[in-house]
Amino acid sequence: MLANQNGLLLRISQEDNVYVLLRPLTEGSRLQVGEQTVVCKTSLELGHKIAARDIASGEKIIKYGAPIGSATRDIRAGEHVHLHNIKSDYIPTYILNSETD
Amino acid sequence: MSAKTDFPGFLRQDGRKGIRNTILVVYLVECAHHVAREIVYPYRKQGVHLIGFSGCYPNRYAFDMMARLCTHPNTGAVLLVSLGCESFDRRGLTQRVKESGRPVETLVIQERGGTLTTVDQGQAWLEKTLTELEETTTRVTMTVDELVVGAICGGSDATSGITANPAIGRCFDLLVENNASAIFEEGGELIGCEQIMADRAVTPALGEEILSTMEKTARYYTSMGHGSFAVGNADGGLTTVEEKSMGAYAKSGSSPIRGLIKPGDVPPAGGLYLLDIVPDGGARFGFPNINDTAEIAELIACGAHLTLFSTGRGSVVGSAISPVVKVCANPETYRRMDGDMDVDAGRILEGRATLDEVGREIFSQVLAVAAGASTKSESLGHQEFVLTYKTFEPIGPACLPV
C-alpha cells in the first residue's frame, strides 16, 4: 500500500486509478494530485475515493487492482469518485432519495 | 507463534469439543417466544441463551439448522418450548438432542397449563440443569487445530476492506497454518470475486463449483432487484457491490480454498472453507439472509466456535451460542464506540500498527476467547439470533475434495 501527502491519500494497488482518503477532508481544502492542485468542492469522509488521474466516461474504475465499476461521465483527476459518476457492472446500487452525493 | 495454543474445552459425545457450555432455550414458533424469553430472563447472564424459529410452516433447512445448533459443541443442554400446534418437528429435534447425549426437555405450553406454569417449570428445569452441567460435563484440553472460526463483515464502510478485513485475513492464515478450520461466507458480498476465488481452489473441479455458486448468487440477487449493499455502505464511501466485495474478500486471507460448504456442513479437517449462504432453486422465501445475525447463525451451524466480525460503521451485535469478536475497521468509529469493539484495526490507517500486527492480535484474541475470556458483546449480554426460511440442495462431491 502506498500512502502519500502525509498519509492523506492511499493507493491500495499499483494499477488503481483512484485513491482512498485516510482522513476526512473539509470543503475548500487543497490537495495535490499528480501535477495538479485540486480544491475540494464538498467535505468528504474518510474512506471516500478521489480520482488519481483523468478518467473517461465508460472507463473501468480500478481499486484493489480490480475493476469496481465504470465511469458514467468524464472524471477529472482529484474529483470525488462515488455514486454520481460511477456505476456497478453487476447490480445497481440502491440509494435513498437525494443521497446521490 | 509463541502464544499458548491449548486451552480448556468441554468434551461432547461425538468427540467434538466446545469452548462454552451454554444451555439453549428454544422456541419453536413465534407464539412460544414470550414464554421462552421469560424462562431465560433471570438466567441470561448465567450462560442460558434464547434462540428460536418464528414460522409456523415446516422447513427442512430450519429443522437441520436447529438440530446443528442444539448439538453444537458449545451447547451443553437444550430446553424446547413449543406452543403445541405449530408444524415444527419437536419430537424429531428432541430425539436428535437426546442421541447427542445432552440433557433435553420439551415443554408444550398447551399441555402445561399456559404461560405461568410453563415459565415455572422451565425455570425449575434450568435450575436443575445448571447444577447438573457444572457437575457432569467432561473438561478436556483443547488445541487450536480443533477450533472452527467464522468470519463475517457487517456495517461495512470503505475502511473495512483496507484494515479489518485484511487483518482478519492474516489471522485466518495463522489459523490455517495451525490446522484450524476457517470459514468465510459467500453471499452477495463476493459478487465480482468469482474468478480470483476459483483460482484459489485446491482442485479445478472445486473451482468450477465456486464459479457456478457465484452465478447462482448473481442471479438470485438480480431477481431480488437488490445487491447486498445498504445505504450506510455508500455513506461510508463504498460505491458499488463489487467494490464492497473486494474489501469483504480480503477476510479470506491467502490460503488455498479447501472446500465449499452450505449451512450446517461441518468442515471435515483444518483449512479454509467458503460457506455458500444463497438458497438453491431460485428466490422463494426472500433475501438470502435478512441481516448479519442470520449469517452468523449459519457459520455457527457449521461448527464455528467463535466468529470474527469486521465493522466500519459500527455494528454492536453479538450472538447466541458462539462468541463474536468485533474487529473495528474505522479509527473514528472505534473512538466513538470502543465499549463495543474488541480490536482497533483502524490503527493501521493512522500508521499506529501494521496489518501483520493486528492480524496477530486477532489471533491472540481468538485463543483468549477460546480459553474463556468474554468478548465485549458477550459481556454486554448480546445474544442476537435469527433463523428464517430457506431451501438448500446437498453439496456435490467436488465441493469437499480430500
Image (spheres, helix red, strand yellow):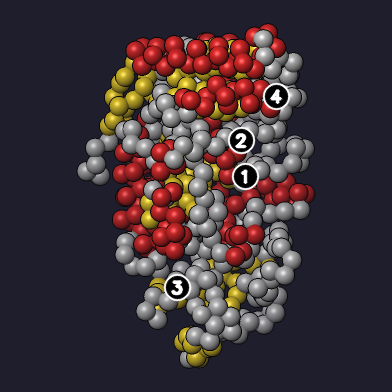
SS under mark 2:
loop
Verify CB contact (< 8 Å) between mark 2 and mark 1: yes
Disc 1 and disc 4 on one polypeptide chain: yes
Tell me where residue B239 appears, x and y as whole percent: 62, 66
Q: Is residue B90 visible?
A: no
Q: Nearer the viewer, residue A35 or A21?
A: A21
Give amino acid for label 4: Cys
Report the disc number at residue A23.
3
Q: CA distance from mark 2 to mark 1?
A: 8 Å
User: Which of the two discs, 1 and 4, labels the residue nearer the N terminus?
Assistant: 4
Q: CA distance from mark 2 to mark 4?
A: 16 Å
Chain identifier of the residue bearing label 3 in the image: A
Q: Which residue is labeled 4 in the image? A: B31
Q: Is residue A63 above or below residue B381?
A: below
Q: CA distance from mark 3 to mark 2?
A: 36 Å
**For this view, does B266 lie left or right of residue A83?**
left
Q: Is residue A25 above or below residue B316?
A: below
SS under mark 3:
loop
> Which quadrant of the figure contains the C terminus of chain A?
bottom right
Report the disc number at residue B386.
2
SS under mark 1:
loop
Which label lies toward us, 3 or 4? Answer: 4
Q: CA distance from mark 1 to mark 3?
A: 29 Å
Q: Residues within 10 Å of mark 3 (few under 14, many from 20)?
A: some
Tell me where residue B309 appears, x and y as whole percent: 47, 47
Report the disc number at residue B291.
1
**For this view, does A38 lie left or right of residue B111?**
left
Residue at 47% across, 22% down? B23
Image quadrant where residue B229 sits: bottom right
Give amino acid for label 2: Val
Give amino acid for label 3: Arg
Residue at 48% across, 62% down? B159
